[in-house]
Each structure stands twice: as structure tokens, then as C-alpha cells.
DNA sequence: CTGAAAGCGCTTACAG
DNA sequence: CTGAAAGCGCTTACAG
């Protein structure tokens, strides 16, 4: 890590090895560090410092390229100005969009966003949370965490607010998609399309993808079953395959499923674009056409939408979710168990 | 932003409002803060502190949930432990993959990664760099920056190392894809496929997407022309459309292009998956089938690869690029103008 | 083998 | 209208 520790030696450019402090500025402006500090952080109006002095200091800071040391400010103020998020991965448009909106909203509030990917692994989640707390994040958001409550507990011990996104927890307010009703609506759309195509319902609808243990998958399965019940259809356990998230897992699960069947299911409820990848690969490799089966995907990807307009998708409203998240950060009146559910939008119906 | 400033008041849980410091630990262990500090940060072996005392302190820190304040450590050590990256957006798999590998590699080195999206806007790039420098990042990586040299200059003034990724700059070492040869190889693959399909080259190949001003697009255009020249084909200016990155721009550009033509081009070199989105939408909306035109995309998306296996793609080797990036961070012997070019991998040929 | 002391660069209550 | 002083929580050279 040499470049890091010897950064200065690489750049002979600026004469001063040290960076400018308020003491330097005070010397230049012939005033005190206190005054410089007050002017620079805006508290000078309360202090009735003369406009003239303020201007002088501001100009000087500008021309000398002064940059306040946030570590020092954070230490003194006991506020880091940092907000943290843990995220499973960036490997789909849902999570990367979450990161992007999170960062934008944080910046809008003058906060610095730190995000760490924890690969749906509880140990990595804890470790990342520990680091974020060491950096004194002012708030920690657990997104899609496998063990959000432990993180909330760690935050609580440190006196730091925590929130859950995407997957709910019981020890902090949660903002998630309305998974059950979204899945129900998506399933109804699938059944409608089968009807419209005159397809035989007897070939069944397969639910595939996601983790059986996680809240969202369970809810989506319930929504799936509910929609079918509404249409007078029973659902067999064998047609529900929460085979985890990875594309490969979905591909393998589908392959195993098809070994016991002679025909493709009439339709599939695919529980993420990641699983979709595996499904599509299996179809292709088995010599099937995509349009032999009606597909609804609980998740959204714009390129998939463009390439395959027949695909029905439930797009989770990331922008709204992040707005709700920051509404809670701005005004933390919510009880720990609070659950906000945001309706996903159906695409391609 | 009330939750942030009043975080503690929300959580009556832990009795102590304040978080534990080395002073508290020193009191508990009946030793001095210096000793606690040395034990906690590992410098105690050099100091010949007794194993027994060290164990006692470590156990205590553990049981009391001590967490070192990184702001204080950073201030004192004059090293923040933070590494920054600016990124255009997270809106495709290339950039989100960069963020993910960057974060993973940073963490492996005990560094904290901060990523800011700057929307290909020089003003936002500068502003983000300013904030990162205020947080005393130890190194700043400009990814796909429209104005990397200004950022390098800002870093240089602050005595901070900077590096460029994806788009090169002249004031810091750069790691980019081998755009020219990658484009050349992709173009050759396109031409081969046209030949294999017995398609008429007279319908031409359209190059579409990207910014005419940016280095990578220029290089890719040159590679495109070079491949055609190698095959004895001339290239008309009208067949080169660097219409910027957004999907909508590509769609509009293609629409305009087609107003002067009666037939689709035989093939297209699409300069990003983002542009691809717009292209595909236009085709669909104009009643065309995707397979009426041979498409090569300089960029990669796994879902696109699954949905449309005929699509040829040049996959930029993100993992290798990030490895090279950190190799330079670890050992900063490179001259500012150093340019490392990583060959992209062709997919679907 | 261990501790007292100075200092990193800020902010803020207090005194004038 | 402005400044001196204390202190945020660490680290580290120095003294013993």
C-alpha cells in the first residue's frame, strides 16, 4: 500500500507538504483561528463578525485552496457526516439503482454515503456494520440483509439509528416493496395472458427463484398462491422452487424440475432478474424458444424490457423507497417495527 | 435531518450516552490510555507490553463493545483509511461491476471505499472530488471522468495520489480497455458473421452510440474503420453516429438516420449496452425483428447475453482492470502519463 | 515493561 | 465585534 502512505513524496508539485489549516489562514488574515473557523463553517452570522473580515477570510480560503479537514470537524462535532448502507451486491439493476438513489439523496443532505457489499452473508454484514460504526456513521441502512436485527442491535448499542430497506427487520423501521400484492398482481397478469393465449392451465405455472427463508420470497409465494386461489386454481408444492438467488442455481433447479416432466410449464413466475438469467439460459440450451412459455419476473431490468417486450415485470419503485427512507431519516418518529410497503409497478402487461 | 443529530435520544437502550474510549478502558483495566491504545492497534509487540495485560485489555474491549473512533485515529495519524472513486452512474453492469470490485479490493486492504456518481458532468466531478479531498481520501480514482486532469490537479495540490480508470488522463496513470483493438476485433466478428450469413455488405454497418469527444469512442471508431479497411471496405462518415450515451439519444439518432434510408443497415456496432437499449426499442417500435440486423455491442450485460445469444459483445475485463488499478495503488512507481490497456473479451462470437 | 504529555485540526462556550 | 482556551479520541516519541 505504498502509494497511500507516501502519497506526498510522489508529488513534488506543491511546495508545502502539509495542507493548510485554519491557523495558517488566521495568520494570513491577521485574525484568530476561532474567527476563521466561524466564518468558514457559517456560524459567523450568529457571532456578528464583520462582513469585511468574513469576505477577506473567504477570499483567502478560496485562493489558497483551503479544504477543511472533515476528520477533525467530525471528531470535534461528534458527528461524522457519513451515512452507511450495506447491500448484498451490485449485480442487478435493482440494487445498483438503490445505491445510486441513496448516494444522491445523501449528498443532497450534505451527507457522505458509504456503501459496502456483503454478499448476503451474515458474517460479512456484521463486519461491515462494525467498520461503519467505527467510522461513526450517523445512520446505517441495511438493504436486503440476511440478519438485519443483529445490525440494528449493534447500532443501538452504539447509539446510532438504523433502518431496513428491501428486507424487513423487527428492531428498526423497514421500507420494502409490497411483495405480496405485487406478486399477486403479477400472477394475475400471467394467468390473464395464459387465458388470452388460450394456453392450457393444466401445464401449470412454476414459481422459481429466491430464498425460501427470506421474508420477501415467502410473501411473494403467498401472493402467487392467493392469485391462483382467486382464479379457482390449486397450487402444488412441487411447483414452488425457491432455489436461492444465483442464476446458476435457478438453471440447475429448473433442469431438475424438468427431469420429472415431459412438457414445459405454461408459465413461470421468476423471482428476480438474476434467476431469469438462469432460466433463459436453460431454455436456450435445451433448444426451447423463449416464447414457448409465458414469463413474469418480479424485478425489473431495462435492457431485458427492451430485448424481450413480452416479458412481464414487477418493477420495484426504488425512487419512492429511497424517498421514504430519507423521510424517516429526516424525521425519526417511527417505532422500530414500522413497516412501509411500496407498491411495485407492473411493466409489459 | 433530525434523526441524525438526535440519534441517541431515540435509543434509550444503552445506559451510557457516550461511547467507550480508551480512557474508559484504561480505567477498567487499571492501566494507561497509551497502553490501551498500543494494545488495540497492534503496536504493542514493539512496545514489549506483557501478553497478560494485552489479553486483559483485548478481552475488556471485546466484552464492553469498544469500537475505535476512526475520525480520531485518522486525525492523529494523518491518514484517513478512505479511498475514493468518482463514477458516472451505476446504470449499467460495467460501472456497477467496477464499483463492486473496487469496494472489495479496497476492503481487502483495510481501506474504506467511498463512491460518488457524477453523471458525466465536470462540475459534479469537481464537487465530488472536493468533498472527497475534504474527507482526506488517501487516493482518488476518476472513473469515466469527463475531466480527469482537473481532478488530478486538485489531488496534486492536496498531495493526494490520483488514478484514472476507463477514460485516460494525462496527469495521472490510467487503466483503460484496449478500445481500439477491441473494437477492431468486434468489427471483424461482425463482418465475419455478415459473410457467413451471405448478407450484402452494401447495406453497410452503422456505428452508433458514445461521445465523439471522448477518448474511448474515438478509439473505437478508429478500430471500427481499421477492421473495415483490412477487409477492403471504405467507411462513410454518415455511418458513424456518436450520439452520446443515453438510450433515448441512440433511439432518436437511429430514427433520424433511418429517415434517409429505405433499408436497415446490415449490421450495427453499438457502443454500449445503454445505447443498445435505445436501438432495440426503435427496432421494436418500427416493427422490425432483432435478427434482421447483425449486432455487435462494445459492452457486456449478462441478461442481454442470456436473452439474445446472437448478440456479439465485447466484455471489458473489469476484474483485471481493478486488479491493475490496485497494483498501482500498492506500488506507485508509474509516471503520470502511464497508460495500461486491458484487452476486452469477445462474447457470443 | 509502562505512563505522562503533546498534538492532529477543528468547534464552541465563555470572556471581553 | 473578536480571541484564548478547552476538548473531541486517538497516536507516538520520549522518559523512565
Image (cartoon, coloured by chain):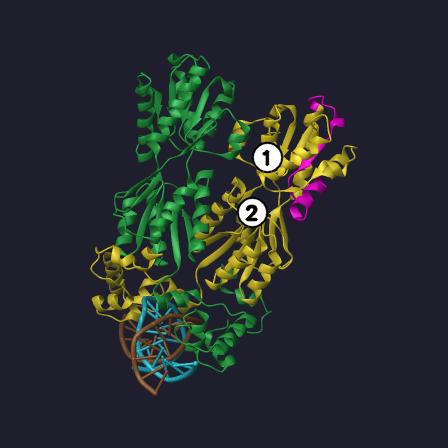
Chain colours: A yellow, B green, C cyan, D brown
Letter of the chain that mark 2 sits on in the rendering: A
Instruction: Determine the secondary structure under disc 2.
Output: helix
Which residue is pictured at 59% across the width and 55% down the height?
A122
Q: Is residue A41 above or below residue B104?
A: below
Callout 2 environment at 10 Å: few (<14), some (14 to 19), or many (20+)? many
Q: Nearer the viewer, residue B152 or A284?
A: A284
Residue A134 image offset from top left, x and y in percent? 47, 64
Q: Could you tell me residue A144's position as x and y percent?
A: 58, 49
Say whether residue B265 is left or right of residue A205: left
Residue at screen point 26% across, 53% down: B156
Range covered by the magenta-colored residues:
A196-223
Q: Position of residue A13 (x, y in %)?
A: 21, 55
Front residue of A343/B48: it is: B48
Q: Give the quarter of the image for residue A201.
A: top right
Residue tagged by mark 2? A321
Residue B264 visible to an observer of this rendering:
no
- Taking the magenta stretch, the answer to whether it contains residue B309 is no
Specify whether residue A229 is in view.
yes
Does A220 appear in magenta? yes
Q: Residues within 10 Å of mark 1 (few under 14, many from 20)?
A: many
Image marks 1 and 2: residues in contact by CB distance under 8 Å: no
Amino acid at each position: 500500500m505504498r502509494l497511500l502512505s507516501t502519497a506526498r513524496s510522489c508529488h513534488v508539485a506543491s511546495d508545502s507538504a502539509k495542507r493548510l489549516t485554519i491557523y495558517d489562514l488566521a495568520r494570513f488574515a491577521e485574525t484568530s483561528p476561532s474567527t476563521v473557523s466561524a466564518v468558514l463553517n457559517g456560524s459567523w452570522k450568529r457571532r456578528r463578525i464583520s462582513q469585511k473580515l468574513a469576505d477577506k477570510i473567504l477570499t483567502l480560503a478560496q485562493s489558497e485552496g483551503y479544504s477543511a479537514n472533515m476528520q477533525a470537524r467530525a471528531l470535534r462535532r461528534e458527528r461524522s457526516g457519513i451515512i452507511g448502507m450495506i447491500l448484498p451486491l451490485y449485480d442487478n439493476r435493482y440494487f445498483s439503482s438503490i445505491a445510486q438513489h441513496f448516494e444522491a439523496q445523501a449528498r443532497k443532505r450534505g451527507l457522505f454515503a458509504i456503501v459496502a457489499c456483503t454478499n448476503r452473508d451474515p458474517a460479512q454484514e456484521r463486519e461491515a456494520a462494525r467498520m461503519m460504526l467505527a467510522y461513526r456513521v450517523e445512520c446505517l441502512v441495511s438493504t436486503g440483509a440476511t440478519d438485519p436485527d443483529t445490525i440494528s442491535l449493534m447500532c443501538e448499542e452504539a447509539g446510532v439509528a438504523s433502518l431496513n430497506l428491501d428486507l424487513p427487520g423487527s428492531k428498526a423501521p423497514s421500507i420494502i416493496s409490497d411483495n405480496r400484492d405485487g406478486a399477486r398482481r403479477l400472477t394475475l397478469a400471467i394467468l390473464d395472458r395464459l387465458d388470452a393465449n388460450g394456453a392450457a392451465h393444466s401445464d401449470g405455472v412454476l414459481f422459481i427463484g429466491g430464498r425460501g427463508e427470506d421474508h420477501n420470497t415467502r410473501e411473494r409465494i403467498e401472493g402467487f398462491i392467493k392469485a391462483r386461489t382467486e382464479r379457482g386454481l390449486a397450487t402444488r408444492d412441487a411447483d414452488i422452487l425457491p432455489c436461492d438467488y444465483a442464476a446458476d442455481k435457478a438453471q440447475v433447479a429448473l433442469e431438475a424440475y424438468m427431469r420429472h416432466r415431459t412438457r414445459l410449464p405454461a408459465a413461470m413466475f421468476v423471482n428476480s432478474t438474476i434467476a431469469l438469467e438462469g432460466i433463459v439460459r436453460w431454455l436456450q440450451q435445451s433448444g426451447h424458444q423463449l416464447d414457448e412459455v409465458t414469463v413474469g419476473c418480479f424485478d425489473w431490468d431495462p435492457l431485458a424490457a427492451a430485448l424481450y417486450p413480452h416479458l412481464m415485470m414487477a418493477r420495484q419503485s426504488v425512487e419512492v423507497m429511497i424517498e421514504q427512507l430519507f423521510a424517516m431519516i429526516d424525521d425519526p418518529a417511527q417505532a422500530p417495527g414500522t413497516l412501509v410497503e411500496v407498491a411495485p409497478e407492473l411493466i409489459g402487461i
